[in-house]
Image (tube, rainbow, N blue to C red):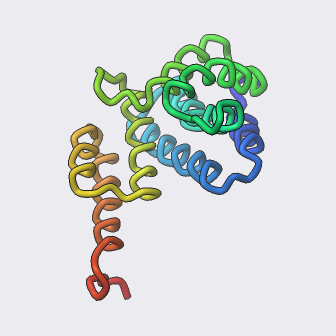
Amino acid sequence: MINEEARLLRSALRYEEGHARRTQHILKVYALAKLFGEEEKLSDEDRQILQAAAILHDIAIKYCKEHGSGDAGQERQREAAPRLVAQFLSEANYLPAYAPKILDLVLRHHDYDHDRSRLLQLLMEADLIVNCFENPPDEKQAERIRGLFQTGGGIELLSLCLKESRKRQAPAGGDDRP
């Protein structure tokens, strides 16, 4: 069997050893990327590449924290990611031709200042939405993030997320939840 996505996901979750934030982050970004890929009617190949990249997009964080005096900055992650991504993909029987495309998405998912492929755009939008739920941005950050979105589905979910985060940041008495 090739491209065993369930095996890849389980391997990534095992690798995180129950770390709550990173485990939940993987699952949430994966779910949104899968949703966006289906909504955008991606080909099977592109969908598999996007979903694998979503699973592995932050895989280097743990390694960097454990092997770099806690430094898991973007540059250190870019150095560690190629080996880790290759290992995870190989163990899950991904076609070798997919590996460079998946690695490119993993390495560039925080590269907001350059042209983006369709797959990179979808991965970035999924990751940014989850990041906004996990760490609500201030209004200036929210405007910058809004400017990065291009897809209708991503724009809609980001708007809902930011609306809810404003409610959570409102002073006491300003919350209209039942």
Q: Quadrant of residue 3?
A: top right
When the figure is inspected, residue 32 is found, relative to residue 8, above or below; the finding is: below
Q: Would you say 12 lies left or right of 97 here?
A: right
Q: Residue at x 28, y 40 (%)?
A: 149
The image position of residue 81, as x and y in percent, is: 61, 24
Q: Is residue 51 visible?
A: no
Q: Would you say 152 lies left or right of 105 here?
A: left
Please tell me which residue lies in front, 85 or 21.
21
Q: Quadrant of residue 70?
A: top right
The image position of residue 59, as x and y in percent, is: 63, 34
The image position of residue 90, as x and y in percent, is: 74, 20
Residue ranking furthest to the front: 69
Q: Would you say 60 lies left or right of 119 here?
A: right
Q: Residue at x 56, y 26 (%)?
A: 76
Q: Is residue 77 visible?
A: yes
Residue ranking furthest to the top: 97
Q: Residue at x 71, y 36 (%)?
A: 66
